[in-house]
Amino acid sequence: MPKIAIVTDSTADMPPSYYEENDVTMVPLVVRFGEDLYKDWVEMPPKKFYAMMRAASAPPKTSQPSVQDFIEAYRKHSGCDHIFSIHLSSKLSGTYQSANIASQSIKVPVTVIDSKQASIGTALILGELIKARNEGKGVAEISRIAEDLIRSIRILFCVDTLKYLELGGRIGKASALVGSILNIKPILTLDDGIVVPLKKVKGRKKLYKEIVEIMKKTAAKKIKVGMIHADAPEIIADLENLIRAEGIKYDMLISSEIGSVIGTYVGPGTFGVVFYPEEQEANTRALIDDR
């Protein structure tokens, strides 16, 4: 059985204990308020971050890990046969590029994966890689699992305001929505790692209903689900109740908070749902086509 290590970054938005329990090396990004630097999740948990964000006179800034940060992370696994290193969309951050450059400086082979996702979109793929590694699967099979998930996994998220995406330059093709009519709530997604608008809905109740309808259209017999929020746990509780009431068959794999780095770009009040069919061969492209 090959000895395989897994590396990721803090934007998978899982608590540090998760990585310790699952033998994963996490390389943190950094958030900065003025001159003060904090390691995402390690020194800046979500509750502290959103309190500081609301009180700050200027929005925080973020920075990716350096190439050296990744070299040091990979060197911890010098006794392994292979390293899988999975990261948030390369269209949203240079983290993937730093990891890729670092992978060329060590002797152990490294597969650097662009998840084309963010937050628990990355975390759900990470979870399947952990499972595959623990089951003793080989490099080729783990690579195939990652590729299949990247193709099939979908994220729907809603921001309370588009201003943070706009300020941070991560708004992608959703820029046309800036200045939308009051109470119009866009449902956003990631298409090939870029933020794009999917639907515009008026009112919170219709927003929830539309999200569930999209999930129903793209769901196979059963889906695996993760939910995320930025200081808004009551929203995902309401959304899960509706998913359950609509009879969607699902396994809730992860429910977590959006950390400080992703939170810098989406802001408080954001929530999202990530899902993929239990059967990977199911056709889920309907989500992107349904605009």
Image (spheres, rainbow, N blue to C red):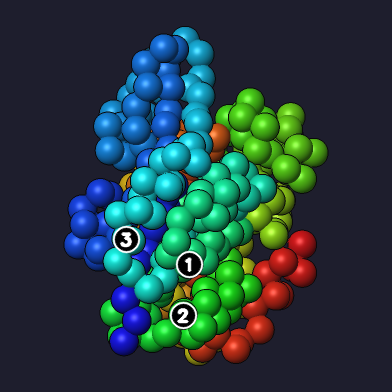
Q: In whole angstroms, how far apart are the C-alphas of marks 1 and 3?
A: 11 Å
Q: Amino acid at mark 1?
A: Pro
10 Å crowding of disc 3: few (<14), some (14-19), many (20+): some
Q: Looking at the image, tell me whether mark 1 or mark 3 is earlier in sequence order.
A: 3
Q: Which mark is residue 129?
A: none
Question: Which of these two is toward me, 59 or 29?
Answer: 29
Q: Label 1, on which residue?
A: 109
Q: Secondary structure at mark 2?
A: helix
Q: What residue appears at the point 27 percent right and 32 percent down from the top-left corner?
A: 43
Q: What residue appears at the point 27 percent right and 38 percent down from the top-left corner?
A: 42
Circles 1 and 3: CB atoms closer than 8 Å: no
Q: Nearer the viewer, mark 2 or mark 1?
A: 1
Q: Is residue 33 visible?
A: yes
Q: Is residue 122 visible?
A: no
Q: Amino acid at mark 2?
A: Val
**193 lies left or right of 205:** right
**225 lies left or right of 25:** right
10 Å crowding of disc 2: few (<14), some (14-19), many (20+): some
Circles 2 and 1: CB atoms closer than 8 Å: yes
In the rendered image, the vertical position of residue 198 relative to residue 285, given as above or below = above
Percent from the top left, x then y, of residue 235? 40, 49
Q: Label 2, on which residue?
A: 139
Q: Amino acid at mark 3?
A: His
Q: Looking at the image, tell me whether mark 2 or mark 1 is earlier in sequence order.
A: 1
Q: Label 3, on which residue?
A: 77
Q: In whole angstroms, how far apart are the C-alphas of marks 2 and 1?
A: 10 Å
